[in-house]
Image: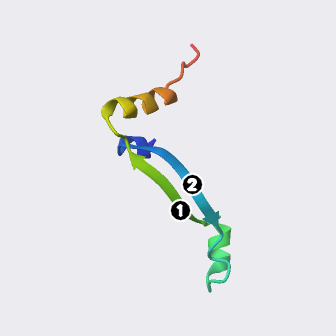
């Protein structure tokens, strides 16, 4: 949701790993489930594209 509010669409994680395994404080990193990631996102071409992405998130809330 934060990515959309910043005007980005097509967010995806492209790589994820436990990069701290060999670090001196690796036990702390593992305790907290720390991972390194690379991600991709692009700026929406226009407001209509951004609004379409927001519309995908809307859902009816049961009464």
In this rendering, the answer to whether 46 lies above or below 18 is above
- Residue 4, image x and y in percent? 41, 41
Say whether residue 41 is left or right of residue 27.
Answer: left
Between the C-alphas of marks 1 and 2, the distance is 6 Å
Q: Residue at x 32, y 35 (%)?
A: 46
Q: Residue furthest bottom?
A: 24
- Residue 62, image x and y in percent? 59, 16
Which residue bears the numbered disc 1? 38
Q: Residue furthest left?
A: 47
Q: Residue at x 58, y 57 (%)?
A: 14
Q: Residue at x 50, y 28 (%)?
A: 56
- Residue 10, image x and y in percent? 49, 44
Give the image quarter of residue 8.
top left
- Residue 58, image x and y in percent? 49, 25
Which residue bears the numbered disc 2? 13
Front in this rendered view, residue 39 or 32: 39
In this rendering, the answer to whether 51 lies above or below 26 is above
Front in this rendered view, residue 47 or 34: 47
Say whether residue 51 is left or right of residue 59.
Answer: left
Q: What is the crowding at mark 2: few (fewer than 14 residues within 10 Å), some, or many (at least 20)?
A: few
């Amino acid at each position: 949701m934060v990515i959309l509010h910043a005007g980005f669409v097509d967010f995806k994680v492209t790589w994820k790993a436990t990069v701290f395994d060999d670090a001196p404080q690796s036990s702390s990193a593992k305790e907290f489930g720390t991972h390194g990631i690379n991600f991709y996102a692009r700026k929406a071409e226009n407001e209509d594209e951004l609004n379409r992405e927001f519309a995908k998130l809307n859902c009816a809330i049961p009464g």
